[in-house]
């Protein structure tokens, strides 16, 4: 059993596994080299050889405890027939959603369309040390719907009027989308992944009176599916703030990843012994090393005798210096020996 799964399943606090969201990404020169020759992001995710190579880049550099497959949560809308394009300084742009076309999808065609993702996982698992975890992931139904239906006005502002107009449509999509997300989880695990992380990146945009329908219940269904299939599951409902408490009480995953707005002292008092991951602001890695160590020390000291996975409260930023990542990894590794 890997350090990560030991922490997740057995709640082992004797060691601190470490990995980073977006650890295989733009801050690495070796990734930028590949990306410069592969401008279509979706095609890059579907290139099993390059996807596997990118996944292993941070493992080779930093000897982290887990690899996370190089892919994207929007591979699911792509697999369901929506065009997905990534435009510089704009982010992902999806074609107009067609509910009739959406309902014509079936699991077999969806699986075949995303087969290169599963092939990449298979290839990566063969090359990855057995003591290291290989993390697969999905986007939560709500977060995917935000993209699929274009529910944001601006970067962090929800289009409330569109949300009201499409309430019935959203409820229908939520139920059907769950089937494909469960299939995507199972396919990734069958290919060789041993953990799944559910990214609810836009949970913080959900109005308070819709949290149960759009966040808690959809994540509960996916978490129960994972538990029924003995798949360790990490949930990351970013932006929930104090509502993390209700999320954990209702959803009860093996582990919850916290964002940088969650006070670690509050978390350890309110999370009832559940494994906790992350928390530190990724911007800290842009500062001088003493400030970075001080920030890391806060999380390490709070969670010293608690099942904790060291990570960040969001993904590594593109402007991060890889040397700082290496220093941080070394600091965390040495912490238990202090």
Image: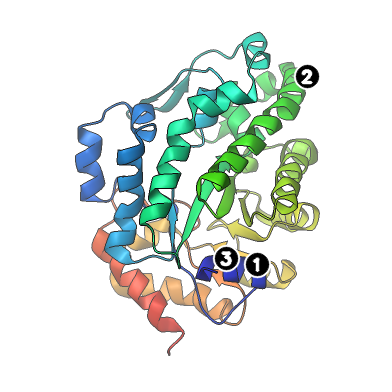
- Identify the mark at residue 315; answer none if there is no mark: none
Query: Residue 270's x, y, as percent?
Result: 73, 68
At 61% across and 73% down in the image, what residue appears? 307
Q: Please, what secondary structure does the residue beneath circle 2 have?
A: helix
Label 1 sits on residue: 9
Q: Residues within 10 Å of mark 2 (few under 14, many from 20)?
A: few
Distance from disc 2 to disc 1, alpha carbons, whole Å, reads: 38 Å
> Taking 145 as reference, is 24 above or below it?
below
Foreground mark, 2 or 1, reads 1
Q: In which quarter of the image is the N terminus?
A: bottom right
Locate residue 85, reporting x and y percent. 40, 22
In this rendered view, identify the residue nearer to me: 77 or 204.
77
- The answer to whether mark 1 and mark 3 are in CB contact below 8 A is yes
Q: Which of marks 2 and 1 is nearer the N terminus?
A: 1
Tell me: 269 left or right of 286.
Answer: right
Q: Nearer the viewer, mark 2 or mark 3?
A: 3
Q: Which residue is identified by label 2?
A: 168
- Tag on residue 5? 3
């Amino acid at each position: 059993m890997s350090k990560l799964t030991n922490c997740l399943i057995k709640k082992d606090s004797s060691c601190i596994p470490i990995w980073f969201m977006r650890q295989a990404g733009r801050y690495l020169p070796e990734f930028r080299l590949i990306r410069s020759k592969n401008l279509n992001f979706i095609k890059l995710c579907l290139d099993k050889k390059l996807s596997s190579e990118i996944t292993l880049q941070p493992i080779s550099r930093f000897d982290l405890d887990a690899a996370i497959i190089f892919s994207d949560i929007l591979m699911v809308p792509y697999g369901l027939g929506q065009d997905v394009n990534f435009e510089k300084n704009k982010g992902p742009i999806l074609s107009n959603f067609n509910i009739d076309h959406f309902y014509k999808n079936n699991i077999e065609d969806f699986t075949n369309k995303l087969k290169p993702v599963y092939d990449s996982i298979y290839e990566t698992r063969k090359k990855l040390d057995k003591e290291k975890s290989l993390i697969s992931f999905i986007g939560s139904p709500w977060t995917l719907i935000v993209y699929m239906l274009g529910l944001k006005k601006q970067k962090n502002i929800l289009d409330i009027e569109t949300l009201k107009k499409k309430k019935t449509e959203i409820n229908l999509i939520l139920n059907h989308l769950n089937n494909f997300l469960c299939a995507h989880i199972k396919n990734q695990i069958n290919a060789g992944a041993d953990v799944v992380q559910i990214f609810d990146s836009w949970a913080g945009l959900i109005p308070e009176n819709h949290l149960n329908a759009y966040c808690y219940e959809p994540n509960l269904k996916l978490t129960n599916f994972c538990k029924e299939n003995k798949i360790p599951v990490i949930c990351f409902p970013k932006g929930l703030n104090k509502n993390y408490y209700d999320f954990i009480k209702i959803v009860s995953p093996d582990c919850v990843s916290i964002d940088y707005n969650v006070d670690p002292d509050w978390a350890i008092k309110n999370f009832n012994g559940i494994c906790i991951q992350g928390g530190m602001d990724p911007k800290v890695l842009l500062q001088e090393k003493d400030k970075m160590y001080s920030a890391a020390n806060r999380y390490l000291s709070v969670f010293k005798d608690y099942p904790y996975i060291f990570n960040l409260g969001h993904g590594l930023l593109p402007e991060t210096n890889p040397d700082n990542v290496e220093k941080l990894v070394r600091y965390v590794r040495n912490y238990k020996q202090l």
